Amino acid sequence: MMVCVAPSILAADFARLGEEVAAVERGGADYVHVDVMDGHFVPNLTVGPPVVRSLRAVTRLPIDVHLMVEEPDRFAQAFVEAGAAMVSVHVEVSPHLDRTLSFIKELGARAGVVLNPSTPVGTLEEVAGLVDYVLVMSVNPGFGGQAFLPASASKVRRVRALLDAAGNRAPVEIDGGIDLETVDEVVRAGAEILVAGSAIFRTPDPTVATRTLRDAARRAAASIGATRA
């Protein structure tokens, strides 16, 4: 089991965004996570395709775009054309989820589905064989720096079980309150992509913070393998 770290630029200093991304890249980040908020689906506004395009010009890392918007089909293409390698949409606002996922795939990006904390895992059942990854929100989306919701680890396990039952080894991603205190629990639950914002960018050295979180995640993953062996 390979665990990846995706620093979220929501917590970064946008006046120094290129430097911030370079710092986490030096620390061994696997992705750059971009939270897109429209002020309707969530009570906040963030960034658009121009920011993704600027990031694409300064980093080799894949860009992971999380669309927290009411009409994801309207925006997916613009973000892929700007450089997104992964685009996730919320099941809560996607009435034709299979069509939306297929559209993102046709654009050449990996297609993910996001579940809010109160959204049942069963809503994924009809697309479990189609998704490239599932993002479990471990806080209510809209703002960074929130505390991890304890029930989230159990939810990761249930998502992993649903994907496995569908014969899909797509990774489970988790976002919200991920830090050195929660990393072991979520990795043991089956999370393979860890999104972290404040735990990385709100520290004196994002390079060191990225490396430390990545190493802790991979130790947790290695201990699972050792236990099973």
Image: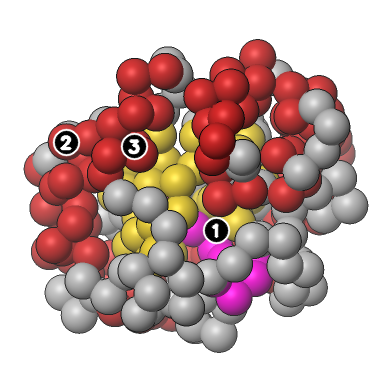
- Look at the image and tell me whether residue 43 can be seen: yes
Location of residue 139 in the rendering, given as x and y in whole percent from the top left corner: 64, 71
Q: Is residue 63 above or below residue 67?
A: above
Residue 90 appears left or right of 120 = left
Q: Secondary structure at mark 1?
A: helix
Reading the image, the residue beneath label 3 is 52
Of callouts 2 and 1, the N-terminal one: 2
Mark nearest the camera among 1 and 3 is: 3
What number is the disc on residue 160? 1
Residue 4 appears left or right of 132 = right
Q: Residues within 10 Å of mark 2 (few under 14, many from 20)?
A: some
Whether the magenta-drawn stretch holds residue 134 is answered as yes
Badge 2 vs badge 1, beta-carbon distance below 8 Å: no
* Amino acid identity at mark 2: Glu
Which one is in front, 93 or 158?
A: 93
Reading the image, the residue beneath label 2 is 81
Q: CA distance from mark 1 to mark 3?
A: 29 Å
Whether the magenta-drawn stretch holds residue 23 is answered as no
* Amino acid identity at mark 3: Val
Location of residue 213 in the rendering, given as x and y in whole percent from the top left corner: 78, 35
- Look at the image and tell me whether residue 157 can be seen: no
Residue 200 appears left or right of 223 = left
**The magenta segment:** 132-141
Of callouts 1 and 3, the N-terminal one: 3
Residue 156 appears left or right of 182 = left
Q: Secondary structure at mark 2?
A: helix
